[in-house]
Image (spheres, coloured by chain):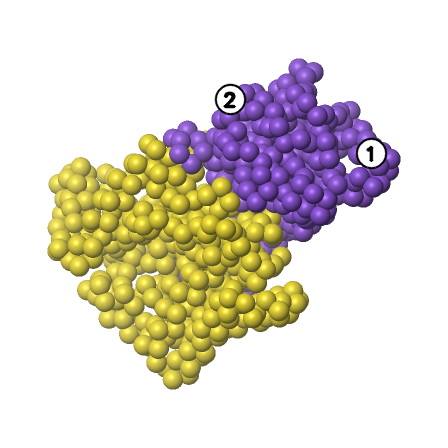
Chain colours: A yellow, B purple
Amino acid sequence: MKAMKLNNPSIPLSKGDEKKSTFKFIISEFKPKGKLLTPFNIISIPIIITGVILIVIRFINGIGSVTNLTQEVPWGLWIGFDVVTGVAFAGGAYVLTFMVYILNLHKYHSIVRVTVLNGFLAYVFYAGALLLDLGRPWNVINPIIGNDFGTSSVLFLVAWHFLLYMIAELIEFSPAVAEWLGAKRARKFLSGMTIAAVIFGITLSTLHQSGLGALYLMAKDKIHPLWYSEFIPVLFLISSVFAGLSMVIFEGSISHKVFFNQISKKNHDAQNGIVLGLAKICAAAMFAYLFMQLLVFIHGKRWDLLNTTMGYWYLIEMIGFVILPMMLYVYSYKKKNITLVKVAAIITMLGIILNRLNVTVIGFRWDAAIRYIPTWMELVVTLTVIFTEIWIFRWVINRMPVLSESPAWVNEKK
Amino acid sequence: MSINRRDFLKTAGVIGVSLTVGDSFAAVKNKGAEVEFHGILYDSTRCVGCLTCETVCAEANKLSAPIGEPKPGVLRKTDEKHNTIVNCYKTSKGEVFIKTQCMHCNEPACVAACLTKAMYKTKEGPVIWRGNKCMGCRYCMVSCPFDVPKFEYHSSNPKIQKCTMCFEKIQKGGIPACAENCPAEAIKFGTRRELLKEARKRIVENPTTYIDEIYGDHTAGGTGFLYISSAPFNELGINTKLQNKSYPELSKGFLFSVPTVFVVLPTILLGIYEATKKNQFNESNEIE
Ligand code: SF4
Ligand code: SF4
């Protein structure tokens, strides 16, 4: 596989230069492309360095040395934001693969790869964040090797699904890697597995997106009743649809600026149609979500809770971050206003962050005498995770045919 | 390719089912009648707040000696260095002492939560923690309705700490350190069935002393640790709002739906895929 690419003229390097040896090829690919002193680099590099130092301290002195976690609130920002919120945002991958590969909506094909890449990296990094939060990470292998299979645990299910889903996404993305390396036969083989991986991946996603909510089912007495119901899994699943797609819209609008030169004219022009289509789906999903929330609210007879501080907070979430962006999506779709779609996407994403944190952190032990408030160090580590992910994302985009067109030989063979 | 796909789905289905159905709830419930669950009956009317139990517990588990003493208005809490704590409350029946520790639930939330079975309900009744399995995820802490498991946040090799009902001593035929040493005989070890009988007897024989309730009889699906008291339990800092259903019951519905989803959803997806496949040739050739 590697031998093939050496003298293959169609290596899709953006600069197009040929390489002498595998080793040199790999080394040269690690060199940054483009300017080093961009605003993003200037902000992210010091944060990543600080984050790495904090992670070292965390492993030497224990989790308590960098976090504010307590005996009552054992899961904080790293789980509530990095894992639970991050995975919701990564939901775009399963929704889009469903639309493109299962429903065969070709319109969205040009953004599938970048979304799957994003999803894959998100899982790798958020699962990584999970490792930071484990007190005894050397035992992380136990539920996989069977020491022991805690099959009655929702977390067992989620952990396995994370692992399997990463594999599924890697398979879905692998043709791009093969194209980068110029491995024709491998590409053919790998793309033959796409549909199976997609079906498997969607099933896994359905279960672990809802599973992340189901994790909190046993914490019935600890979560504020406005956010706790037996329907958390369903709410998490539905909201992951518009969380993921809003992320796709948001990320797409940035990519189209930053990686402008990589995107073909055809795909640039198609982008607006794609964005509007996604806006419509988001609006529909949000409507279903709202309806579900309303049912849960009425079913739970929660009227008297509204007139409390937490009640107002709940109303802010529902009105400001669900109803408002939903209407914005509808309006911008009707008016074909791309800017407004992006605004709606950002508000929706803030709403998802709010919702996930309300369940996992803010509403968790809301009545505790000492509230958990994350330390600056937890924030820096979280940012480190996000920034490192973006670095890798950028590295891949600049090398593999993700946003750019596949090399010519891919279509030749058909 | 279509054969590959089908095989793949079949394998996926099998993995899914075996991963998720398993012996889930059988493991949590005590089915075998050979060994009975053991427990502890704590009688707050006898407790004198001498802290002997705290002291011997610390010795037995190599933890720290008690800090402070029970006083009304002071809430001491169990932590990673103290598995049991005795507090004092001013109640409608005067000052009453109350001991807290793991409840050793019949169907423990912590055990259902643990993805490695590090938290383990022994057939003798005590709920124990096994360090060679635990990965320190703290999901047991999130799930336990009594906030019992504690985590060593300041260790690079942290353990989960909680009362184990001195399981190792029990296995050798002994009884828990607290029950063994309580000078007021407020802590009684035995099988859960005997203890419930004993508790009812005390209540019936002294109806003016005790309130007519055994805490732990039904709460959270029944617990191994049982309380009787002269004052209502909500005056003693005990959470009386917990449900009587067991806590693992709450996520059961979700877990039971998983195998179904794993079989039905791929089938549906495959069906839609086959149905929409022809679009593929009509509109574009760029499908992989
Ligand atoms: S009280 Fe908590 S830690 Fe103890 S057995 Fe019950 S659920 Fe587990
Ligand atoms: S912290 Fe350990 S004992 Fe608790 S649920 Fe996680 S693996 Fe199990």
- Which badge, 1 or 2, comes first in the chain's sequence? 2
Name the outermost residue toward the front.
Answer: B94
Name the outermost residue toward the bottom.
Answer: A335
| Residues at marks 1 and 2 on the same chain | yes
Give the secondary structure at mark 1. helix
| Residue for point 40% across, 45% down | A68
| Residue for point 55% across, 33% down | B69
Relative horizontal placement of residue A145, taking residue A110 as reference (left or right): right
- Dot 2 surroundings within 10 Å: few (below 14), some, or many (20 or more)? few
Q: Quadrant of residue B158?
A: top left
Relative horizontal placement of residue A307, taking residue A281 as reference (left or right): right
Can residue A87 be seen by looking at this rendering?
A: no
Q: Is residue B244 above or below residue A135?
A: below
Q: How many marks?
A: 2
Q: Nearer the viewer, residue A328 or A202?
A: A328
Give coordinates of residue B26: x percent, y percent.
70, 36
Residue labelled with disc 2: B62
Tell which subunit mark 2 falls on.
B
Tell which subunit mark 1 falls on.
B
Q: Nearer the viewer, residue A277 or A110?
A: A277
Give the secondary structure at mark 2. loop
Relative horizontal placement of residue A295, taking residue A339 as reference (left or right): right
Q: Which mark is residue B202?
A: 1
Observer-side mark, 1 or 2, equals: 1
Give coordinates of residue A256: x percent, y percent.
26, 66
Name the outermost residue toward the right.
Answer: B205
Q: Quadrant of residue A111?
A: bottom left
What amino acid type is highlighted by mark number 2? Lys
| Residue for point 85% across, 33% down | B201
Q: Is residue B19 above or below residue B63?
A: below
What amino acid type is highlighted by mark number 1? Arg
